[in-house]
Amino acid sequence: MNSEWRVNLLDLGRAIDLVSPHLASHRRRVARMRHLLAAWAAYHHERLDGTGYPFHLTENDLCMSARIMAISDVFTALTEDRPYREGMDSTGALEILSGMAENASLDGRLVELLRANRDEIDAIRSGAQAEARAEYVALFPTLTAEPPADA
C-alpha cells in the first residue's frame, strides 16, 4: 500500500473516531423519538375526561403532544375526503372540536390554537391528502381507474 493511501486511511480512521460519539448520541435520540411517537399514536383516541380508549387515560396522564395528536386525528378524520363521503369544511369540523372541548374530551386551548391557524393547517392537510392520493393512484392504477361507462 503506498504512503498516500495509508495517510488517507489514517485520516478516515480519525474522522470515524471523531464522529462516532455523535452518531451514537444521534441513534439514542432517534430511538427515544420513535418511542415517543409510538406513545403519541397509541394515545390518539384518549380523551381528557377518561372516556377514550384503549387505556382510558385522563387529562393528568396525557402530555401536550398526545393532546395535539388527538385533535389532529379528529380534525383530519372530519375534513379529509373518504371513499364513502366528502370531507367536511373546516368551519364545521371546528364546531365539532369545540363541542368536544366543552365536554372535556379535548384540550380547549389547543382547539382554539387550531382555530386561529386553521387556514394554514387545512392547506397542509389538503396538500398531504392530495399527495397521498397521487401516490396511491401511482401504486394501484388498476384499483383507482374509473369503471367503464357501460358497467
Image: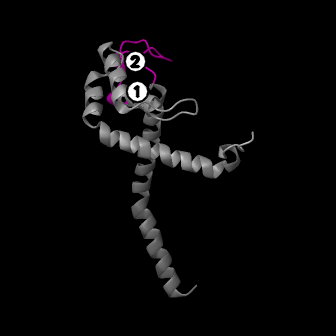
Q: Amino acid at mark 1?
A: Ala
Label 1 element class: helix
Residue 65 occupies quadrant = top left
State whether residue 124 is above or below residue 18.
above
Q: Position of residue 33 (x, y in %)?
A: 43, 40
Residue in the image at 50% along x and 49% along y: 131
Question: From mark 1 to mark 2, how far is it between C-alphas?
Answer: 8 Å
How crowded pointer 1 is (Cα within 10 Å; few <14, some 14-19, many 20+) is rated as: many
Q: Nearer the viewer, residue 90 or 107?
A: 90
Residue in the image at 43% along x and 30% along y: 88
Residue in the image at 47% along x and 29% along y: 77
- Tell me which label, 1 or 2, sits earlier in the chain: 2
Q: Position of residue 104 (x, y in %)?
A: 32, 14
Q: Amino acid at mark 2?
A: Arg
Instruction: Tell whether position 116 is magenta.
Output: no
State whether residue 60 is above or below residue 146.
above
Q: Quadrant of the C terminus?
A: top right
How crowded pointer 2 is (Cα within 10 Å; few <14, some 14-19, many 20+) is rated as: many
The residue at the far front in this view is 150
Q: Position of residue 39 (x, y in %)?
A: 45, 30
Q: Position of residue 124 (x, y in %)?
A: 38, 44
Label 2 element class: loop
Is the magenta region chiefly helix, strand or loop?
loop
Residue 74 occupies quadrant = top left
- The total number of labels drawn is 2
Instruction: Give the colouring mode of the picture.
Output: one colour
Asked whether disc 1 touches disc 2, contact meaning CB atoms under 8 Å apart, the reply is: yes
User: Which residues are the magenta region?
Assistant: 45-66
State whether residue 11 is above or below residue 4.
above
Where is mark 2, residue-wise?
A: 47
Instruction: Tell whether position 54 is magenta.
Output: yes
Where is mark 1, residue-wise?
A: 70
